[in-house]
Image: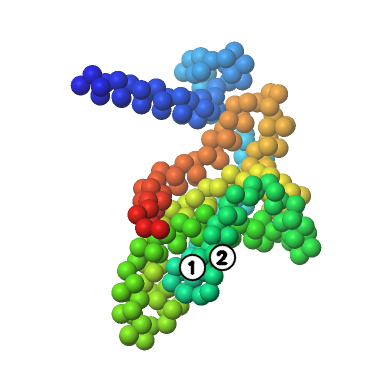
Amino acid sequence: MMKKVLLYTLLFFSALVLFFPLLYAVSASFMQPQDIYAGNLLPSSLSSINFDAYRDVFNRIPLFHYLTVSFTMSSIVMIGQLIVCSLSAYAFAFIPFKGRDLIFFIFLATMLIPWEATVIPNFLTILNLEWLNTYQGLTFPFFALPFGIFLLRQHFLTIPKELWESAQMDGCSRFRYYLRFVLPLSKTSLSALGIYGFLTTWNQYLWPLLVTNEDSVRPVQIGLKMLIANESSSSWNMVMAAVVAILIPTLLILFVGLKYIREGLTAGALKG
C-alpha cells in the first residue's frame, strides 16, 4: 500500500512538472498583462479574467489562415509518407531481389544522418525545381521517411507468408495483395506513422522558413514567431492565447491517436 502511495505521488508530481508549461500557457492567456508581469500563476481575481486575448489574436494576425496552411501541409506529408513508406516497406518485406537486405540496411543507416546536414542539398533541389513558396517545396522532401519504412517493414514481416501463397494460388497480383491484404492488416502501424508524420510536420519551423517568403503558404509556427516579435513587449497574454490555439489540434490528435501510436510502435517488435 505504501509503495502505491509513493508511486502515485511521484507520478502526480512528474505529471505536474511535465504539464506545467502548458497549464501556465492556458492560465496566462486569461490574465491581464499586469498579472503576467507580476509573476502570478493565476489571474489575481475572477473579475480580472480576460477573454479578449483569443479574440484579439485572430484580429491581429491571420491565425486561421496559418492554421489552414499548417493543416494542409501536415496532411499532404502524412498521406505522402503513408504511400511512399508502405510501398517501400512492402518491397523490402515481400519482393525478393538481389541485395535486398544490404540495400535496406544502407537505407536504414541514413537515419544516422542529422536532418540539418541535408537542409542545403534539399533547399538547392527545391530552388532548381522552382518550388519555392509552393506546397510541393514544403512537403516533398519528407515523403521518404526511413523510420516509417522500418516501422512498416517490421510489421509486414509478421504477416504469415502462407497468406501470400494462398492469394497467389487464387491469381492475386502483388499490387492487389498489397491493397487488399497487407494494408488492411496494418491499420495500427499505418495509423501510428500517420499521426507521427502529421505531428512532426505541424511543428516544423526551419524548413518552411527557408522555402517560403510569402504569407500565403507560411504555416502557423512562423505566424506565431511573427506575433511574438511584434507583441512580446506588451501582450504576452495574446501570445499565450495563440500558443493555446495552435496546441489544441495537435493535442486532440495526440490524445485520440495515442493508443494507435503505442500499438503501432510495438506491432513488429517481436520479429526482425
Q: Which residue is mark 2?
A: 103
Quadrant in which the N terminus is drawn? top left
Do we see residue 217 in this rendering? yes
Q: Nearer the viewer, residue 132 or 272?
A: 272
Seen in the picture, residue 155 relative to 67 is either above or below; the reply is below
Asked if the residues shown at circle 1 and circle 2 are in contact, with their CB atoms under 8 angstroms apart, the answer is yes
Q: Which residue type does callout 2 highlight?
A: Ile
SS for dot 2: helix
Q: Nearer the viewer, residue 197 or 272?
A: 272
Report x, y in % for residue 147.
52, 54
Report x, y in % for residue 211.
73, 52
Q: CA distance from mark 1 to mark 2?
A: 9 Å
Number of numbered discs on residues:
2
Q: Considering only order in the chain, which callout, 2 or 1, is on the residue closer to the N terminus?
A: 1
Q: Which residue is mark 1?
A: 92
Report x, y in % for residue 6.
30, 20
Q: Is 170 positioned to the left or the right of 139 in the image?
A: left
Label 1: few (<14), some (14–19) or many (≥20) C-alpha neighbours in 10 Å: many
Q: Nearer the viewer, residue 117 or 86?
A: 117
Report x, y in % for residue 101.
50, 65
Do we see residue 188 in this rendering? no
Q: Which mark is residue 271?
A: none
Seen in the picture, residue 192 relative to 245 is either above or below; the reply is below
Q: Which residue type does callout 1 highlight?
A: Phe
